[in-house]
Image (tube, helix red, strand yellow):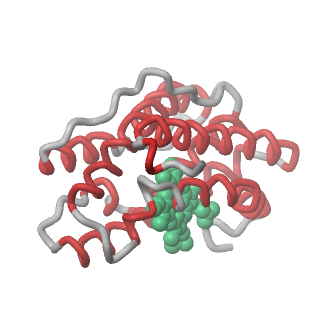
Amino acid sequence: MRPGESPLARHLRAATAPAHEALDHHALLAPLVTDALDEAAYGRALAALHAPQARLEAEVAGAIDALAPGYGFTRRVADLRADLAALGREPSDDSGIRTPGLATPAGLVGALYVLEGSRFGGAMIARHVRRVLGEDTPVRFFAGDGVGRHWRAFWDLADGLCGPADHAPAAAAAEAAFEAFRAHLDRCAEPADLPG
Ligand code: HEM
């Protein structure tokens, strides 16, 4: 089976499709994959992503050794900060971010799915950003490193830790992690960016 095609993977992808769409259609992130992207919009998107990324990574790093020793979780927030510094921008502040509970295997898998999945989808964003803004644009965060290897390792872990009864709680944790991103993006957006 290819990574990301197990029953758990199909469940998580279907359950979180609306939450993913709320992010990829969000006023702060949608420009990332348009030809109208400029450096200011790229910097705003990275700055807004910083706080939930930093918080969720810290929570996962704190929980993972008890539940999945040897996984080799790697954080990406240093790459995000390096891209921001290269663009001359400040990261967003992470106060007020609520993340899901990660003390159970299902909770950990749900939150990790959001982090590892966004690493996986980020490769496409990096290619687009470089094409529109130029090959010298700092894209360490989106381009990632060893993206396919991380994606395979994640599904090996997730499918090993979760049985059918874990599908729903893992999806709930993933939805809560997505919601932490969405709520923070809303806080970072200008009123004119938001619907209604
Ligand atoms: C403009 C913003 C975004 C775009 C255009 C985008 C695009 C994509 C794409 C194209 C994929 C599929 C990659 C592939 O199959 O090769 C993907 C997967 C994924 N992305 Fe995003 N993404 C965005 C933002 C985010 C954010 C902010 C997060 C989480 C914080 C996220 C989480 C995920 C997850 C979990 C998957 C895996 C879905 C699966 O199970 O296959 N994405 N994304």
Residue 99 in the image, given as x and y percentages of width and height:
58, 29
Relative side of 113 to 161, left or right: left
**In front: 170, or 49?**
49
State the residue at coordinates (25%, 76%): 132
Viewer-side residue, 12 vs 196? 196
Q: Would you place residue 189 above or below residue 120 in this image?
A: above
Which quarter of the rendered picture does the N terminus lie within?
bottom right
113 with respect to 87 (left or right):
right
Kindly indicate the quadrant of the structure image that contains residue 100.
top right
User: Residue 137 falls in which quadrant of the image?
Assistant: bottom left
* Vertical side of 71 occupied by 34: above or below: below
The residue depicted at 45 percent of the width and 50 percent of the height is 193
At a point 20% along the width and 71% down the height, the residue shown is 133
Asked if one can make out residue 151 in the rendered structure from this viewpoint, the answer is no
Query: How many numbered discs, if any?
Result: 0
Is residue 123 visible in the rendered structure shown here? Answer: yes
| Residue farthest to the top, as pictured | 95
